[in-house]
Image: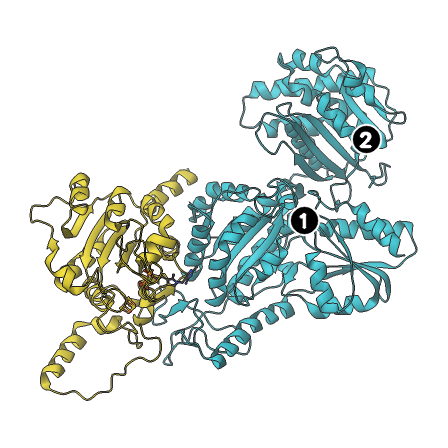
Amino acid sequence: MSETSSPTNEAPLLDTGVERDLQNVQESGLLDYRSESLPTWCPGCGYYGITHAMTEAINELDIEPHNLVFVSGIGCAGRYPFFMNAYGLHAIHGRAVPMGAGVKIANPDLSVIVVGGDGDGLGIGGGHLSHAIRRNVDITYILFDNGIYGLTKGQTSPTTPQEQITGTHPYGNPDMPLDAVTLGISYRASFVARGYAGQQHDLTPIMRRAFAHKGFSFVVVYTPCVTFDKVNITYENMRGNWKPLPDDYDDGNILEAMKYAMDDTLWHGVFYEEQRPTFHDHERETAEKARS
Amino acid sequence: MSVKTDNASRDVVIAVCGAAGDGSIAAGQILNMAATTMGYHVMNFDSFPAEIRGFGKSVAHSRISRDKALTPGTMVNCLVALDDPHSITELHSLTQDGVVIYDSKPADYHEEDQAVAGWIQPGMIGYGAPLRDLSAQATKSSKSRNIVALGVISYVFGFEPGAFHEAIHRRWSGKSESLREMNVEAFNLGYEYAEANIDKVDPIDFKNITEGHVTDANIVSGNEAAAKACLDANLRLYVGYPITPATKIMEILAKQLPKQGGVVVQSEDEISAICHVIGGGFAGKRSCTATSGPGVCLMTEALNLAVMAEVPCVLINAQRGGPSTGLPTKTEQSDLNLAIYGASGESPRAVLAPANVGECYQITRKAFEVADGFQTPVIVLMDFFLSNRMEDVRWQAEDPGTWGTYEDVLAEPSEEEYKRFAFTESGISPRSYPGMQDLQHPITGLEHTEDSLPAYSGENHTRMMAKRQRKLDKLAREWPGPEVVGPEGDLDVGIISWGSTVGAGKNAIKQLQAKTDARIGGLFPRLVWPLQTDAITEFAGRCEHLVVAETNYTGQFANLVQQVTLREVTRVAEAAARPLPTQIIVDRVQDLL
Ligand SMILES: Cc1ncc(C[n+]2csc(CCOP(=O)(O)OP(=O)(O)O)c2C)c(N)n1
Ligand code: SF4
């Protein structure tokens, strides 16, 4: 990730095709959600794709920028709020989930989306996930899973496969990787999905459902770190092994969800969704009990 | 220190001692309630076994006085012995002419040296009453010995029995009428027995000198006062993780806050607690957590974000003995450095320290206003002693306005581009929070520009450091000057203390003024960071000797005073797992004179 300069947008338009595309984008409303800062991620980073899918979904749901809060951890993924026109809380490493929960609990009228990397969410901040799920606070947590520490330039993360060689494991990673999706299902998050940054047309609907879900929605997005991972989540490797969940898949069956999540094939889509009372529903009850 | 017991001062310390389960604490509560209704002030500090309930010694320690006491007093004028073995170990704190109330017919025969009565020294006064028998007579159980003993106290010291009857009904208002009546009967039997059998020879006499019935006083602990402050400050979000001695604050808020539309969350750890709170503060709602030293250690990283990103929030640190897990049920003021400096980088925040229970209310309430007004985390430094001691408090009289008023500066949408961290003279930039239209912005713990984008230039960093510091300079100017007591002009000795040690500091001045001709004064800050340096140097300039008293090992506030005044100070600093006894300050000052 380049920390030095952002590319500027001043190049003259070359042909009318581009102009037309630009016009389409402008009319789409997508730009309303973009800040003036252009993303500083490396060219080719999967995060661009995730950002696009998220923006499309937010635009479709017509969430107003001043009622939208992005909360992020530290890492390349953590830079996300700077690139969006919304309120943003760039938190500290591993703590985006509790901070996002705090924002939502303090003001339930806001739409709160938490984003962060796999190191942020499963390593240093791993302890918070289960508890946010237990509380079922109505926020969406999008885990940008690139299997590597990006911002600190290529060390082992909790999702790096065994034997992979990284900056901190020059002889190969000895530790078994975690799988965020199985974690989410086993904690019984009320919404668990897996998506892929390279597959826009599937990712946007997942995002839309996640944002619309009432309760804690957990979306794990596989995303290539083109700079520091040449062997694991690369665009090539993802091509063969990536399948949408079957048409007759029942997303209300948690055992099925676990079976598909643990399969060798990388299935993607919404694994599990359950409507259960959210933190706010419980709070309303608590308030009633306290008052009576 | 020995409390005078003459009528004019009407100031006694009564300790009710027994094994856990003997009802010492309940007896103390009723005594306190009764004394307060009679118009007296009380200061009460209970001690009970630190570890598992059901074993060990329980002591309710109440100071009852006409004028508001500054300290609970270290010597006891009257020991009520509900048992023998534990009460014997309390005798060392009885004054030479102290009174012991004991059971004249205990359940088992004791060798003389195992009964508290056998330990009463010449000069002391013993009043025996068959506590156990009278208790059984009233309630068919020995468990109301404590209430029988209150009857004896009421008679011998001349406390109005009616006030006790009322207090007994209040103490057990949730219980059945018959249970309350049985306890009133136990009290009456004690009173009548004493009236008929005890020859009063002690000088303590509260008879016919009651101050008039008071109904608006509450006997509350520092934790209760702080919790009420949160409620009255319109707290919206409390998130905490249980830890002694702060837990009570959370338990009260869990019950009360939902009634007024606020939310309480028990988080998985203190990191999560402060993170939720910062989220809430960023969302524009008053948010707070309370913890003790080990919890603050976990919170420092996130708290530093609140400094950098200028998020208002309040952190109450009810200090206990440290380091590490330390002494969970003992008092200490050793987290001052942690409160002021606990962060990477240089991270200016406000630290307030209340001096008594009433101030736990006032200062905590004010903390929310300071947090909003200066867009900063505010740490309220309480300690075990303040958290758990009880005082009579009249809420109307506890005016947070004493500590100034601070405005919350909010942004308005305008044509010009909104800069969340705009450079201003005061350092305070109008803030906005999610939900406010057209004022969207990110905040970050990275160093940032006025419009909150990450920026690493030296020039910008310097200006931002200065901006954040200017806010605190403004607070130091606007917060009322530290309390200064004593004669004007030059002083032989100036005593400085803070937080829960302010009482002992002021008490020392009173005692020294009474027994020496020396000119003694004191300075007692409530804003302990940023320091009000002008006031401190001005005061120091008048003093030949400066004494700084606090309950920590290294003299953390003394270090600050030395730094500001560039002179040697005398430290009265001890880490002895107790509130600082006034006598230690007095002795030290007398050495200097
Ligand atoms: C307490 C703390 N420890 C370490 C760091 C350094 N650090 C910054 S980002 C990061 C890991 C980033 O990896 P990941 O969360 O997977 O996000 P990515 O950069 O891949 O998006 C680390 C270790 C930090 N900021 N804070
Ligand atoms: S995740 Fe990898 S590719 Fe993406 S910005 Fe970071 S370093 Fe670059």
Rendered hue of chain A is yellow
Which residue is tagged 1?
A: B356
Of the numbered discs 2 and 1, the one sitting upstream in the chain is 2
User: Disc 1 marks which amino acid?
Assistant: Asn
Query: Which colour assignment does the render follow?
Result: by chain
Horizontally, residue B557 falls left or right of residue B230, namely right
Quarter of the picture holding the N terminus of chain B: top right
Name the residue: 12% across, 43% down: A250
- For the residue pair B522 and B298, the one nearer the viewer reads as B298
| Subunit under mark 2 | B
Q: Position of residue B212 (x, y in %)?
A: 74, 38
Q: Are marks 2 and 1 in contact (CB under 8 Å)?
A: no
Rendered hue of chain B is cyan
Q: Position of residue A148 (x, y in %)?
A: 29, 60
- Looking at the image, which residue sits at the far front? A171
* Quarter of image, ligand 1: bottom left
**Helix, strand or loop status at disc 2:** loop
- For the residue pair B58 and B33, the one nearer the viewer reads as B58
